[in-house]
Image: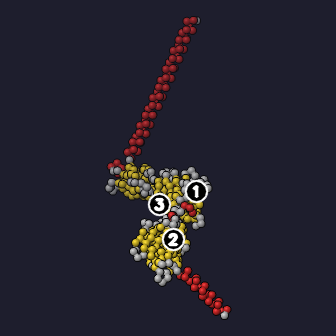
Amino acid sequence: MYDAVLHRCLLLCVSLMLPSRLQGEVTSHQYVKGILGERFTIQCNISLQPGESVMQVRWLDVQNKTLLSYIMNEHKTETEGRVFVNLSRPDASAITFSSLSVKDDGCHRCAFDVYPSGLQEGKTCITVIAEVKPGSNKTVVSGKSTDLQCSYGVVKHVQQVLWRKITPGSKADVASYSKMDKGSVKDLFKDRFTISHGLQETRISISPVKPEDDACFSCEFNTYPYGTKKGVTCLTVYVLPKPQLDYRSLGPGIIGANCSAVGKPAPEISWNVETDNRTFNVSHSSKDRADGTTLVISTLFVQASLLDEKSVKCIVHHRGLESPIGVTLNTKIGTALTILITVTAVAALLVLCLCICLWRCFLRKDDGNDNKKQQFNRKIRECSG
């Protein structure tokens, strides 16, 4: 008797609980993460009782405003522009954000108007996270100014921004910014580097740029609770060449013309000589220097007679130049200089000889005056005696 009563009570409890579970139950992923700026889809499913049907579906945003809605039978849809219906079935609905934004961070509700049981709702909460977007790599000429940039879309997560210089085998802290320290630059860089005041958009400025700044730089956003998010941007520094051209005699009738240039990256040197069989050959050499630049030397061996008749030009090519630099070898300057030196020496010698002659004449005049004075004094003594 007791067992029969207990069995009936259990059946009654089950019968009371069963409708609430089956009638219009809406299921969805409660918490999801989406990346800022990317497509993202959320979905709700509903289980219907026999005889029930969904009349209308509405999606509400984090501010409880209607994001979009549609009527099942008429297939009429109201959209928000960047949000559209991805899936529309009697038992499911999904919407897609074409580009997830910061304002989508929060809980979105799906509302099913079910006939005849009424409204049934589900909820999906989106946490919008971001990826670091580094600025484009930069190429700049030494001595100029430049800046490097990074951004992180969800500023409320950011606690601090740190910039580091990355070189093979090492990293060096450059500058940082947070709400507490308001920006600081390490002593090694403080003379030429500055950091912007911001946690979403960050920028370091360099003025003037030096060859040693040729490196990659990491921008690190310390976020809570997602840890460090990092991006990398690189700076390439060019040192423009300033070619020098000279020549020397290597023997009877043979001249070696030397064209040298220092640059980063290494410049390329070529020669422009009017077609002539009196050009012997060209030799090239290069040497890497401690500051990262490269010295390139090109030597052209020619017959001396060629330089009196033809134009010999050194052409320097470099990535940082809009057009090559050309320097013409002019031996006439050397000849004119030799003549000038000779003429100057002869003139100086003549002036010296003239000075000596005048000095000797002056001495003779002084001696004559002394003799006359002595004779005059002698006559005075004779008269007085």
**Picture coordinates of residue 231 (x, y %)?**
52, 63
Residue drawn at x 38%, y 47% as measured from the top left: 330
Left or right of 300 on screen, residue 25? right
Is there a contact, CB below 8 Å, between mark 2 and mark 3?
A: no
Q: Amino acid at mark 2?
A: Arg
**Picture coordinates of residue 302 (x, y %)?**
38, 54
Between 307 and 347, the residue placed more toward the observer is: 307
Q: Which mark is residue 109?
A: 2
Left or right of 318 on screen, residue 127? right
Q: Amino acid at mark 3?
A: Ser
Please rate how many residues cluster around mark 3, counting C-alpha atoms within 10 Å: few if below 14, some from 14 to 19, many from 20. Answer: few
**Picture coordinates of residue 351 (x, y %)?**
45, 31
Between 21 and 220, the residue placed more toward the observer is: 21
Residue at far right of view: 2
User: In the rendered view, how is the structure colored?
Assistant: secondary structure
Q: Which mark is residue 136?
A: 3
Judge whether residue 168 can be spotted in this image.
Answer: no
Between 309 and 145, the residue placed more toward the observer is: 145
Residue drawn at x 47%, y 67% as measured from the top left: 66
Mark 3–mark 1 Cα distance, whole angstroms, equals 21 Å
Which of disc 1 and disc 3 is earlier in sequence? Answer: 3
Q: In this figure, which residue is indicated by the disc labeled 1?
A: 177
Judge whether residue 341 can be spotted in this image.
Answer: yes
Mark 2–mark 1 Cα distance, whole angstroms, equals 38 Å
Residue drawn at x 44%, y 66% as measured from the top left: 80
Which of disc 3 and disc 2 is earlier in sequence? Answer: 2
Which of disc 1 and disc 2 is earlier in sequence? Answer: 2
| Front position among marks 3 and 1 | 1
For label 2, the SS is: strand
